[in-house]
Image (cartoon, grey):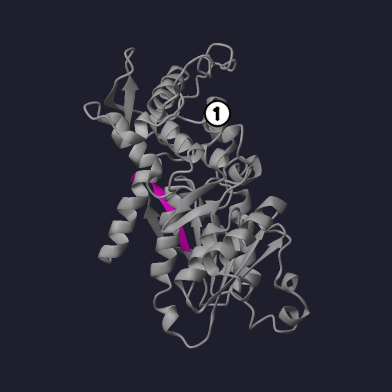
């Protein structure tokens, strides 16, 4: 991997919480606010589902209006304490991000400046001693109140980073981009390196666009690729087009398009009469998806910030989590994919590689198999690549 890529991953690690949607709690660096207002570093775990629903009544979320000074330090330590009391995940992380936003600090490092300076109690710092204006204070307290209700930080800020792309637009109820999805994009990009040498353009299909980050980043990374995405959620169509313009530029429509449609209903003819007339030429070199894959029994284990805010349709994959996955595989094998030369990449539940293998053995007529299984950073089987059997 190039040094620049390694450095960019290190930079992203400062912002990206070490949290998976439901199956893992990572230990993360946090702080504890002492009664005297000082802070100390500690280690804490991720989400906690045992929440008190009536959280606003037990905490005074505003400082006394008669208080002469409302400094950045005061605001930060107060809200970290509130988040800790309500067991909000990564309390210092949340406070720093929200405060940086309220103060209009630079997106790239404003939050880290606050965190680092707050952890260093020996130095007086101009930023921490800065007095908030009434507008800054009110803006910050409004965001704090939303976070106390477990609303995802990405929704409150309205943006987040993905790979090297900063300030991707994010709106509810779309899934907030996870580190695992970054891994999926990297796997696909590496797999397509050989195909990039071909003279003919590559056609990619993304099932379930969401914010659009998978397809858009692949379009940006692979100059010869044209990406068509689909999603049943109108907000996803709007948001992905905004992000395409942000990353690919004003002429993004030449490289990226999105259709409001389900995987079951999507056909190549959905692209228009020209595509229908040239259906064979318009088949796809690659299909990629982060589909709804959480098994129904596991939905009850989701953390509150996921289950109460993010779309159930984008999360739950039916009894065994494979309802949409089966549709994708069947449509790719029989219609979407270029025969014998197309691949399908998906992010899945750790139980799915085995289930997929068994199901495909029973569906020999599809002519496809599980080519490879890849683990995520926590060592769980998370990604599968499917390919056509050689005739």
Q: What is the magenta range?
A: 378-385
Q: Nearer the viewer, residue 289 or 143?
A: 143
Vertical side of 132 occupied by 87: above or below: above
Residue 130 drawn at (x, y percent): 40, 32
Residue at horizontal 30%, vertical 20%?
38
Vertical side of 114 occupied by 80: above or below: above
Q: Is residue 54 magenta?
A: no
Residue 141 visible, this angle: yes
The quadrant in which residue 46 appears is: top left
The quadrant in which residue 278 appears is: bottom right
Vertical side of 269 occupied by 13: above or below: above
Residue 126 drawn at (x, y percent): 33, 34
Label 1 CA crowd tier, 10 Å (few <14, some 14–19, many 20+): few
Q: Is residue 382 magenta?
A: yes
Q: Nearer the viewer, residue 379 or 2?
A: 2
Q: Nearer the viewer, residue 123 or 271?
A: 123
View extreme (front): residue: 68
- Disc 1 secondary structure class: helix
Drawn side of residue 292 relative to residue 390, left or right: right
Of the 4 image quadrants, the one containing the N terminus is bottom left
Residue that label 1 marks: 134
Residue 78 drawn at (x, y percent): 43, 21
Magenta stretch: helix, strand or loop mostly: strand
Vertical side of 67 occupied by 73: above or below: below
Drawn side of residue 348 relative to residue 232, left or right: left
Q: Nearer the viewer, residue 87 or 114?
A: 114
Residue at horizontal 63%, vertical 71%?
336
Drawn side of residue 218 relative to residue 121, left or right: right
Residue 43 drawn at (x, y percent): 29, 28
Residue at horizontal 74%, vertical 61%?
265
Residue 387 visible, this angle: no
């Amino acid at each position: 991997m190039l040094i620049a890529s390694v450095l960019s991953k290190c930079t992203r690690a400062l912002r990206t919480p070490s949290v998976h949607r439901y199956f893992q709690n990572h230990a993360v660096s946090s702080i504890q606010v002492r009664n005297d207002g000082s802070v100390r570093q500690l280690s804490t775990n991720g989400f906690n589902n045992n929440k008190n629903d009536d959280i606003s009544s037990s905490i005074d979320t505003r400082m006394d209006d008669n208080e002469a000074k409302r400094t950045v330090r005061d605001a930060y330590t107060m809200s970290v304490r509130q988040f800790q009391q309500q067991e909000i995940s990564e309390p210092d992380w949340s406070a720093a991000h929200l405060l940086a936003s309220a103060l209009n600090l630079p997106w790239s490092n404003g939050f880290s400046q606050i965190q680092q300076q707050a952890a260093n109690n020996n130095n007086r710092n101009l930023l921490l001693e800065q007095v908030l204006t009434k507008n800054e204070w009110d803006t910050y307290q409004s965001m704090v109140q939303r976070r106390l209700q477990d609303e995802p930080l990405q929704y409150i800020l309205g943006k987040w980073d993905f790979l090297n792309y900063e300030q991707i637009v994010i709106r509810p109820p779309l899934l907030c981009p996870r580190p695992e999805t970054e891994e999926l994009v990297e796997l696909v990009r590496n797999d397509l390196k050989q195909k990039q040498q071909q003279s003919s353009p590559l056609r990619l299909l993304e099932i379930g666009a969401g914010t659009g980050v998978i397809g858009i980043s692949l379009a940006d990374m692979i100059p010869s690729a044209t990406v068509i995405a689909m999603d049943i959620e109108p907000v996803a169509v709007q948001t992905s087009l905004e992000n395409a313009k942000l990353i690919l530029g004003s002429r993004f429509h030449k490289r990226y398009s999105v259709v409001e449609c389900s995987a079951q209903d999507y056909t190549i003819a959905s692209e228009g009469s020209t595509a229908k007339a040239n259906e064979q030429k318009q088949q796809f070199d690659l299909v990629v998806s982060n589909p709804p894959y959480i098994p129904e029994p596991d939905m009850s284990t989701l953390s509150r910030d996921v289950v109460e805010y993010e779309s159930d349709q984008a999360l739950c994959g039916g009894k065994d989590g494979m309802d949409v996955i089966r549709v994708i595989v069947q449509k790719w094998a029989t219609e979407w994919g270029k025969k014998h030369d197309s691949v399908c990449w998906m992010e899945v539940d750790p139980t799915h590689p085995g289930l997929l293998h068994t199901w495909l053995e029973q569906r020999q007529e599809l002519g496809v198999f599980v080519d490879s299984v890849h683990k995520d950073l926590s060592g769980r089987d998370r990604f599968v690549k499917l390919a056509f059997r050689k005739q």
